[in-house]
Amino acid sequence: MDILRQTNPGGQAPDFAMVMLTGAGSGAIADESVSSCAQAYLIKHGLSPDRLRDAVEGAILSRRGLEVRNRRTEALIRELREENERMGRICATLPHELGTSLNPIMIAAGLLRDLS
C-alpha cells in the first residue's frame, strides 16, 4: 500500500493503469487500493496467468476510458467557456441595441401623445 500511496499522493488518477497485487487480501486493503486509483486488486494465492492477463487488460481499458472521458470533459468545458464569452458579448451590446431600436418608437409615442 505504501507504494500505491507514493504513486498517488494527491489522490488524483495517475497517468498509467494500476493493478494492486498482494499476498494478504482483505476488504480494507481492496477498498483502499481502489480508492487510491488502482483499477484492479488481485491476491497472489491461486492467481492464474489468465486472471492476471484479464486484470491487466481491464485496467488498461479502464484507464483509456478515463482518458477519453477526461478529453470529452475538457472539450465541453472549452465549449461552455466560449459560449459564455459569446453570451457576455451579446449581453454587453444589448442595452445599446435596445436603446437604438426603441428610440424611434419613443419619439412616435411622444408625437401621438402631443396630438391627442
Image (spheres, rainbow, N blue to C red):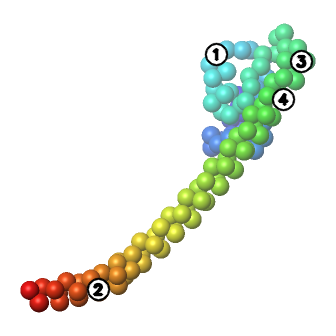
Q: Residue at x 74, y 14 (%)?
A: 24
- Name which residue type carries label 2: Asn
Marks 1 and 4, Cα distance to the nearest angstrom?
Answer: 23 Å
Foreground mark, 2 or 3? Answer: 2
Q: Residue at x 45, y 72 (%)?
A: 90
| Position of residue 41 measured from the top left corner of the image (x, y, whole percent) | 74, 22
Q: Quadrant of residue 67?
A: top right
Q: Quadrant of residue 54?
A: top right
Q: Residue at x 57, y 65 (%)?
A: 82
| Position of residue 80 measured from the top left corner of the image (x, y, whole percent) | 55, 58
Q: Earlier in the sequence, mark 3 or mark 1?
A: 1
The residue furthest top is: 46
SS of the residue under disc 4: helix
Q: Quadrant of residue 21?
A: top right
Q: Earlier in the sequence, mark 2 or mark 4?
A: 4
Q: Earlier in the sequence, mark 2 or mark 1?
A: 1
Q: Earlier in the sequence, mark 4 or mark 3?
A: 3
- Name which residue type carries label 4: Glu
